[in-house]
Amino acid sequence: MRRIPLSAAGERRAVEQADEKIAHCQRHGARHWGDRQYSPEQDRAQQIAGNRAEIGVCEMYDLPWLPQLGRTDVIDCGNIIEVRARIVPGRGTDLGWHPPNANHVGDNPSVPWLLVHAHDGGAGALWAIGWLWGYEAAARARLVSPIWGVHYIAPPYHDIAALDGLVATLREAERDPAPPAPR
């Protein structure tokens, strides 16, 4: 577990992007995931908490933040890490996983998924709890939320230090791609 720092600029961007996402959904009649159970205030808090977690992870690893506005093909943090934030205290603390279904392509099984706890209603301290590869999450998913279609995966998770090494390896591979195969 590791505390995730977040800059003042990151805090502002988290709020701005949450408001933009909610406005986008309202303009296009799209249903964002929070509209089935949360009040507008709770949904906004959840959106901000998720953005704060993603931006904090990006700042921690010096990765670009790739916010998803109406897209599911973008990986949150530098196209390397997906982040799943849970507000603590809240409805639960386990890693959430969306399997494929008729309305959703499902979460990406080929990238690491990092669980972040956002304390104090989502506006407080951010803590990186642990991570799983998407395929590990898919294999271990057992508890289903019928409202959201989400599976929750309880610990154990991989340690954050292992993610540090993985991120370094993936970043190095991007800078120094493998040479072309001989013909």
Image (cartoon, helix red, strand yellow):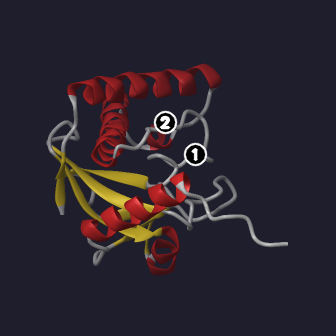
| Quadrant into which the N terminus falls | bottom left
Residue farthest along the front direction in this orientation:
182
Q: Which residue is mark 1?
A: 74
Instruction: Give me the C-alpha separation between circle 2 and circle 1.
Output: 8 Å
- Say the numbered circle drawn on residue 64: none
Residue farthest along the right direction in this orientation:
183
Question: Where residue 139 appears, x then y in whole percent?
Answer: 50, 80
Tell me which label, 2 or 1, sits earlier in the chain.
2
Q: Which residue is more in the foreground, 2 or 50?
A: 2
Question: Where residue 27 appears, x then y in whole percent?
Answer: 59, 19
Labelled pair 2, 1 in contact (Cβ < 8 Å):
yes
Q: Who's the residue at 47% across and 37% down the image? A: 35
Residue 81's place in the image compared with 95, above or below, is above
- Is 82 situated left or right of 27 in this image? left
Q: Who's the residue at 70% across and 58% down the image? A: 102
Residue 47 shows in the view: yes
- Say the numbered circle drawn on residue 67: 2
Q: Who's the residue at 67% across and 64% down the image? A: 179
Q: Who's the residue at 55% across and 59% down the image? A: 107
Residue 52's place in the image compared with 93, above or below, is above
Label 2: element kind: loop
Label 1: element kind: loop
Q: Which residue is more in the foreground, 88 or 81?
A: 81
Residue 146 shows in the view: no
| Quadrant in the rendering for residue 153 | bottom left
| Quadrant into which the C terminus falls | bottom right
The type of residue carrying mark 1 is: Val
Q: Which residue is more in the foreground, 94 or 35?
A: 94
Q: Which residue is more in the foreground, 65 or 34?
A: 65
